[in-house]
Image: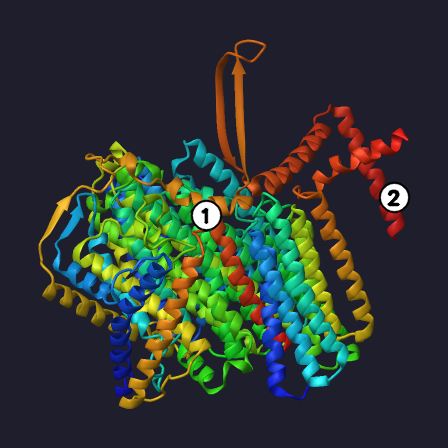
């Protein structure tokens, strides 16, 4: 029955995709139909995966292409957990898209968008559920291609084209690493099975490095993250929500699956994952502070949260190697729970950001402001998302970060002191990251929603349609419920961690809130008066008096200036030789894009030079080509002579 | 060596406070408070020596305690303050190579590094946990004093850094080495310091090393003329 | 939920709220004496709160529901945080309320909304206050976590209830590294309650305010609630510092006599600490904003050394 539900869901998605592509004749009803099919499919999948999670694992073999080559699914607790994440987020994104697709340039594009969205969701579920490396790669490629097409929705813009190039190259690179890994595993095993038993430590480390690179590119670990800010900001907001909320988690699933079942970890793996996680978290949030494009800001926060998840995974490996199994489960639990929470609140944030961008017409937060009065529902939902991502009680972000902090704090039972010092340093980085995230979201929420509108477009913004509110609202409620009842949910799932009971905290909070409110109502006068904001005597405040986002982040920018490394450019041109009469000048401050300039561009340049060299070799006349063939035949003869 | 439990704890408290003063020397900018911190540090070292004396009864320990007390807690800070009165500066604001924040981070790594190195030697040379603690703190203090010397520009701060290094060496000696040797070296070092201070007094107002050059070059001219 | 816990909740919160304005006035009085003035009477803060409750509220045209909601949220979260710090007696059961991270993040939540409300009115002062407040809180956060981590490491538990219980059993001499933690906690107290040298709580020059700038647009009962929550935060942090370093007088069961003694002990210890804070404030000038991270680095250094000490000794 469960298999039926799941397969039914899968086929609904396939049907949705085909509908969108085949019946694409510019009518609104087509993509609406597609989206309703997606919603139905997501519901089926959600219910089915919940049943597997609380029940028994399931194996489905779908299609036996040849002997040894088959597409099979294996859904145990871990896989079904991720299917839950995918289906929940897809459900809400589909509801949101019912309203959002109205703002896409043409109906044909909207139809294609919805169709590819269905394919994307299907492929992600395929990756998570796959039982052997063949189906993993099959669905991984479909996921990569469909997300590329989704991302390139506005392909006329040059920004989108650049983003597309980055994304395509890097995602193909991750597929290459994945294939290499599958080849190594095939050589070791003789089949496509997802296991590596009996392999030597060298092979294990090789497979781990390849897997880490492949999944790391897709997850956005620094320094492999370059595509993430561009892609998430260039794509339409519902696609960004899916990519940032769900696709990154699929990569995390891959890493966790390999570490849990396939490989037997070693210490340097755990330390490496921990350090990469710490660096990603810190650099992600520091770069987010400087961003003024709302969606790029959210994308960098995704990098930060992936870093936090990686820290949990690294701790899991380290504690497992020391035999501290309860602590390892706590760390892994925090990583997985944070995946769920991040999927929920990041999609929520992207969706509301999409609503804001649609209403204002620009992604730059310095042009927004005062939207809290014009778009009240959207702002409340964004506030819930902002509070959750800053890990504040009683929402869900707090619970998962609490679990991570607890795993750090309880590491005092470790024996070796150098690991403990490392853990304390990483703990400090985690704390800094979480506080900087809160600062960044105060900035984001304050600049976008509070005070007065900073531009004409922002002043004329209107609240968005109902489905664009309901989609994120479901997720906002989920944030609150998961935060308050986390301990209860864990015990139903069979895990007992020693964590504070947030429902009690919530209850006490409500009691105290009501108490305070009641006291104030009783003892103080009800009336209130309106007046102008105090601006040192100016009677008519303008938006120019407000604090800008750059101004808000400036003290942090000064403190971390070694990481930002700005360069100041001053160009001056004069009328005369003695440089006395000034003609014109230009002054600019650039933040160095460290990874662009020192890693990506040099590597790209190297490849460019190699390819130019090779193309020069090929661009010759017939005679030289015959010469090449002649030399090759000679070499083959000589090689055959020496090898026999 | 120390079976007395309260004394053990008192020593730990004193060592903790010594480390606090040594980090304050790295961090402070006001010269008067630098001298007060140095006086406090020397007082704590004298108290450590006193505790050792009470426990063991070696007379050299008492001698060291009293010498440190008079020389470093009273005499040297007074000389330094007298010099300060003649100068126009009250604070040392310029840093080179390392700012206070980064020098504190480097000190954390330093202390941990020293701990790692010494823990390899622990079995053979230092049988007691307390010796180990004192040795690590002594060496760390000396290295932190060295950091003060290279990261500051003003001569007076460099002198305080050197004195702090010497305190670290005394602490190390108290915990680990044979005492009479150290005593001789200590007296010698104090004499060197006094000479340095008197030199600074003679040259007076100028306080950075670069300023000594114009003072020396006339002497060179004078020699050349001959 | 046992009666012990409910009783603890009531008594702890009520006593914390009662004592907080007293400590604020005490610090002001000490600073006044240091400046050669007589200063306001000891009960002045109570009178001030009463006066503010009777006044009307003035809201700016640009504000939204954030500024109306924040005073209640701020005080409610701080009151929940007060359940994490046993001031007079330690309850028997702990449903996770004493978790030190929960305590910290409840305070951060209250600060988050304060910062948002600073941006709400659209004034430069509020924005500046929010910006600086979030900057300083971001830089102090690793220090606080490391200090709490050092405490958790030395005392082998993450619940404040257990920590206080343990320190009460053994004197702190058995853990001399707690002195360093005490110094770090003192620095954290100065930072979190916006005292000199980090921020001046009595300035009304806009360019030198951090915390005061965010509360500029509040009036009437809202301002009273904000002031009360600020005072409560100070009392809670003082409670943590005092009960770690000097836990004498803390009771372990809700007997009436024991509670009265514990309350008296807390008031006395708290007053001494408040006088100490006042003297400390009077000895220094406010640091330039970008020198403040140097101060935090010192606290960070001390807590790291606490951990290393635990390895060494």
**Which quadrant of the structure image shows residue C282?**
bottom left
Question: In this picture, is A309 found above or below A442?
Answer: below
Q: Is mark 1 on a helix, strand or loop?
A: loop
Label drawn at residue C288: 1
Residue B194 is situated, as x and y percent measured from the top left of the image, at 74, 56
Give the residue at x 57% y 42%: A594
Q: Which of B222 and B118 is in front in this view?
A: B222
Residue A551 is situated, as x and y percent measured from the top left of the image, at 39, 41
**Which quadrant of the structure image shows residue C80?**
bottom left
Say if residue A232 shows up in the picture.
no
Label drawn at residue A638: 2
Left or right: residue A256 versus residue C280 is: right
Question: In this picture, is B170 found above or below B144?
Answer: below
Give the residue at x 49% y 26%: A587
**Which quadrant of the structure image shows residue C95?**
bottom left
Left or right: residue C289 versus residue C229 is: right
């Amino acid at each position: 029955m469960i298999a039926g539900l799941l397969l039914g869901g899968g086929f609904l998605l396939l049907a949705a995709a085909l509908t969108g592509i085949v019946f694409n004749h510019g009518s609104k009803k087509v993509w609406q139909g597609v989206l309703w099919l997606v919603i139905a499919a997501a519901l089926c999948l959600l219910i089915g995966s919940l049943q597997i999670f609380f029940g028994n694992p399931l194996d489905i073999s779908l299609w036996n292409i040849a002997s040894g080559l088959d597409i099979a699914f294996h859904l145990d607790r871990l896989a079904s957990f991720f299917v839950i994440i995918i289906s929940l987020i897809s459900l809400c994104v589909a509801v949101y898209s019912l309203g959002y697709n109205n703002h896409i340039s043409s109906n044909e594009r909207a139809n294609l968008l919805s169709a590819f969205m269905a394919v994307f969701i299907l492929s992600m579920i395929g990756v998570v559920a796959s039982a052997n490396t063949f189906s993993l790669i099959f669905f991984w490629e479909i996921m990569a291609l469909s997300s590329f097409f989704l991302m390139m929705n506005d392909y006329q813009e040059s920004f989108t084209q650049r983003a597309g190039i980055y994304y395509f190259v890097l995602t193909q690179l991750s597929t290459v690493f994945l294939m290499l890994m599958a080849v190594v595993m095939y050589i070791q095993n003789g089949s496509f099975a997802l296991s590596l038993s009996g392999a030597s430590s060298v092979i294990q480390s090789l497979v781990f490095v390849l897997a880490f690179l492949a999944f790391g590119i897709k997850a956005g670990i620094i320094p492999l993250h370059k595509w993430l800010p561009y892609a998430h900001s260039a794509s339409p907001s519902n696609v960004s929500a899916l990519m940032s909320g769900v696709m990154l988690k699929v990569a995390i699933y891959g890493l966790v699956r390999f570490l849990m079942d396939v490989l037997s970890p070693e210490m340097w793996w755990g330390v490496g994952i921990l350090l990469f996680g710490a660096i990603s978290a810190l650099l992600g949030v520091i770069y987010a502070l400087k961003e003024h494009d709302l969606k790029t800001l959210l994308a960098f926060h995704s990098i930060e949260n992936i870093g936090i998840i990686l820290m949990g995974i690294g701790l899991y490996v380290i504690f497992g190697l020391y035999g501290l199994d309860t602590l390892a489960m706590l760390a892994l639990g925090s990583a997985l729970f944070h995946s769920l929470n991040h999927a929920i609140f990041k999609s929520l944030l992207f969706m509301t950001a999409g609503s804001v961008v649609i209403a204002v017409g620009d992604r730059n937060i310095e042009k927004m402001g005062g939207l809290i009065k014009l778009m009240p529902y959207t702002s409340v939902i964004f506030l819930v998302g902002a509070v959750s991502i800053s890990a504040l009680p009683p929402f869900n972000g707090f619970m998962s970060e609490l679990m991570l902090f607890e795993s750090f704090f309880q590491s005092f039972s470790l024996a070796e002191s150098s690991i403990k010092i490392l853990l304390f340093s990483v703990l400090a980085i985690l704390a800094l990251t979480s506080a900087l995230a809160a600062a960044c979201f105060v900035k984001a929420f304050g600049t976008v929603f509070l005070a007065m509108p900073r531009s004409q477009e922002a002043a004329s913004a209107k609240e968005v349609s109902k489905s664009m509110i309901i989609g994120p609202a479901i997720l906002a409620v989920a944030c609150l419920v998961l935060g308050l009842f986390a301990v209860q949910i864990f015990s139903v799932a069979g895990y007992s961690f020693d964590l504070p009971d947030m429902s009690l905290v919530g209850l006490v909070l409500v009691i105290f809130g009501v108490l305070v409110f009641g006291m104030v109502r009783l003892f103080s006068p009800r009336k209130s008066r309106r007046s102008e904001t105090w601006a040192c005597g100016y009677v008519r405040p303008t938006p120019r008096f407000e604090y800008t986002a750059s101004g808000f982040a400036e003290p942090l920018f000064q403190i971390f200036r070694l990481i930002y490394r700005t360069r100041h450019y001053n160009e001056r041109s004069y009328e005369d030789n003695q440089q006395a009469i000034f003609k014109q000048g230009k002054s600019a401050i650039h933040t160095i894009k460290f990874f662009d300039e020192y890693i990506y561009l040099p590597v790209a340049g190297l490849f460019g030079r190699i390819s130019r060299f090779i193309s020069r070799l090929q661009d010759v006349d017939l005679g030289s080509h015959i010469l090449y063939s002649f030399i090759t035949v000679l070499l083959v003869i000589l090689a055959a002579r020496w090898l026999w | 060596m120390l079976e007395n439990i309260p004394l053990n704890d008192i020593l730990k408290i004193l060592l903790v406070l010594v480390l606090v003063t040594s980090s304050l020397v790295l961090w402070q900018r006001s010269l008067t408070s630098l001298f007060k911190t140095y006086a406090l540090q020397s007082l704590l070292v004298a108290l450590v020596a006193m505790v050792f004396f009470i426990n063991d009864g070696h007379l050299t320990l008492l001698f060291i305690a009293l010498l440190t007390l008079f020389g470093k807690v009273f005499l040297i800070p007074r000389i330094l303050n007298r010099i300060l009165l003649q100068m126009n500066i009250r604070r040392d604001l310029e840093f080179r190579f390392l700012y206070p924040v980064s020098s504190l981070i480097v000190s954390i790594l330093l202390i941990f590094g020293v701990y790692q190195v010494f823990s390899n030697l622990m079995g053979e040379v230092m049988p007691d946990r307390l010796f180990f603690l004192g040795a690590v703190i002594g060496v760390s203090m000396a290295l932190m004093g060295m950091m003060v010397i290279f990261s500051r520009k003003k001569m007076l701060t460099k002198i305080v850094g050197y004195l702090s290094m010497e305190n670290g060496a005394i602490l190390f000696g108290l915990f680990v080495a044979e005492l009479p040797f150290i005593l001789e070296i200590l007296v010698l070092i104090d004499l060197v310091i006094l000479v340095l201070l008197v030199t600074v007094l003679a040259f007076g107002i100028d306080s950075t090393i670069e300023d000594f050059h114009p003072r020396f070059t006339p002497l060179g001219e004078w020699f050349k003329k001959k | 939920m046992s009666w012990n816990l409910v009783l603890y909740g009531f008594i702890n919160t009520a006593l914390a709220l009662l004592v907080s304005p007293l400590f604020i006035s005490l610090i002001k009085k000490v600073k006044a004496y240091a400046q050669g003035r007589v200063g306001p009477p000891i009960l002045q803060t109570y009178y001030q709160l009463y006066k503010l409750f009777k006044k009307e509220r003035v809201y700016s045209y640009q504000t939204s529901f954030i500024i109306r909601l924040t005073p209640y949220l701020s005080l409610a979260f701080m009151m929940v945080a007060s359940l994490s710090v046993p001031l007079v007696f330690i309850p028997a059961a702990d449903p996770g309320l004493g978790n030190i991270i929960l305590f910290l993040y409840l305070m951060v939540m209250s600060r988050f909304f304060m910062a948002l409300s600073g941006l709400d009115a659209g004034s430069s002062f509020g924005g500046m206050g929010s910006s600086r407040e979030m900057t300083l809180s971001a830089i102090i956060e690793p220090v606080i976590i490391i200090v709490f981590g050092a405490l958790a490491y030395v005392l082998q538990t993450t619940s404040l209830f257990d920590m206080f219980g343990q320190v009460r059993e053994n004197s702190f001499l058995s853990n001399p590294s707690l002195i360093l933690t005490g110094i770090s906690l003192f620095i954290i107290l100065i930072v979190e309650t916006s005292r000199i040298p980090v921020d001046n709580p009595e300035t009304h020059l806009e360019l030198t305010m951090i915390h005061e700038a965010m509360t500029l647009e509040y009036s009437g009962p809202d301002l009273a609630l904000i002031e009360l929550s600020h005072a409560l935060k100070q009392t809670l942090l003082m409670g943590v510092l005092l009960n770690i370093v000097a836990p004498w007088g803390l009771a372990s069961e809700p007997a009436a006599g024991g509670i009265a003694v514990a309350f008296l002990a807390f008031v006395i210890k708290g007053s001494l600490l408040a006088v100490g804070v006042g003297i400390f404030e009077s000895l220094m000038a406010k640091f330039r904003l970008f020198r403040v991270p140097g101060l935090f680095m010192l606290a960070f250094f001390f807590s790291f050394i606490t951990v290393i000490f635990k390895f060494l000794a």
